[in-house]
Image (tube, rainbow, N blue to C red):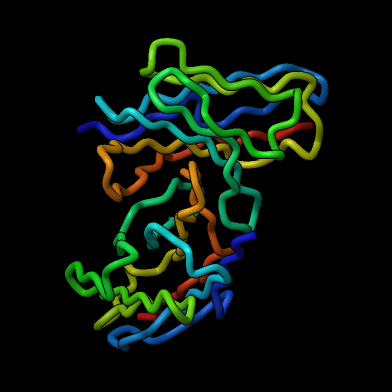
Amino acid sequence: KQEVTQIPAALSVPEGENLVLNCSFTDSAIYNLQWFRQDPGKGLTSLLLIQSSQREQTSGRLNASLDKSSGRSTLYIAASQPGDSATYLCAVRPSSQGAQKLVFGQGTRLTINP
Amino acid sequence: DTGVSQDPRHKITKRGQNVTFRCDPISEHNRLYWYRQTLGQGPEFLTYFQNEAQLEKSRLLSDRFSAERPKGSFSTLEIQRTEQGDSAMYLCASSLEQGGNQPQHFGDGTRLSIL
């Protein structure tokens, strides 16, 4: 059974710092890994999707990497801003036959202090 | 592209009542998913549709839960005889699958509170 873990559960950093969020998964048989942002009381906003054959994806100040063999992904946020404060979730799509669901971690609650 | 739309945003009901939620996916997305999220946890998969066919259901989806997507467009999720443990955020997502890896796009969810 695929399990996804995100550490730390919460992170607080001053504005302007670069930071890394971690995600690990137990089964390397995945189609892709997706990073999301969730603001309080809201749904999920897709940030980046990395296919299993890719090593990284970039969007603006965000860079996500994937090491499928070791079951790890990181989300790097450059020059953090107070508006980046949110919960960040990673999710994997297992590649077992017919599997369409995403399996989520519990998220990292990020606070950027002005 | 108006995004995934869910209605209502909030629902408060008494234990034992039935509730129904609606999800309108992004236009032309052929796949639609339902997830449930409790406080402090990541979403958990409930079920998904490809067009009008319900192709996968989680063991979380007890017999009190039923989901439909009658014309392959919008979907409804009904919970009968609600229980305290049903209190959660119910999230809908959609994707366009054409043999590749496409992201799932989520709505803002329906927050259900059982009194």
Picture coordinates of residue A72, whole percent (x, y)? 46, 78
Pick out the residue farthest to the front: A97
Question: B85 or B30, which lies in front?
Answer: B30
Question: B115 or A55, which lies in front?
Answer: A55
Residue A62 vertical placement versus B71 (above, below)? below
Question: B40 or A41, which lies in front?
Answer: B40
Q: Residue at x 54, y 73 (%)?
A: A6
Q: Is residue B32 left or right of residue B88?
A: left
Pick out the residue farthest to the left: A60
Residue B39 vertical placement versus A16 (above, below)? above
Report which quarter residue A25 is drawn in: bottom right
- The total number of labels drawn is 0
Picture coordinates of residue A41, whole percent (x, y)? 51, 48
Quadrant placement of the N terminus of chain B: top left
Question: Is residue B46 among what the camera can see?
Answer: yes
Picture coordinates of residue A113, whole percent (x, y)? 40, 80
Quadrant placement of the C terminus of chain B: top right
Q: Residue at x 40, y 69 (%)?
A: A85
Question: B53 or A17, which lies in front?
Answer: B53
Report which quarter residue B41 is drawn in: bottom right
Question: Is residue A89 among what the camera can see?
Answer: no
Q: Is residue A49 left or right of residue A6?
A: left
Q: Residue at x 81, y 31 (%)?
A: B83
Picture coordinates of residue B57, whole percent (x, y)? 61, 33
Residue B33 vertical placement versus A87 (above, below)? above
Q: Is residue A85 left or right of residue B1?
A: right
Q: Residue at x 64, y 39 (%)?
A: B58
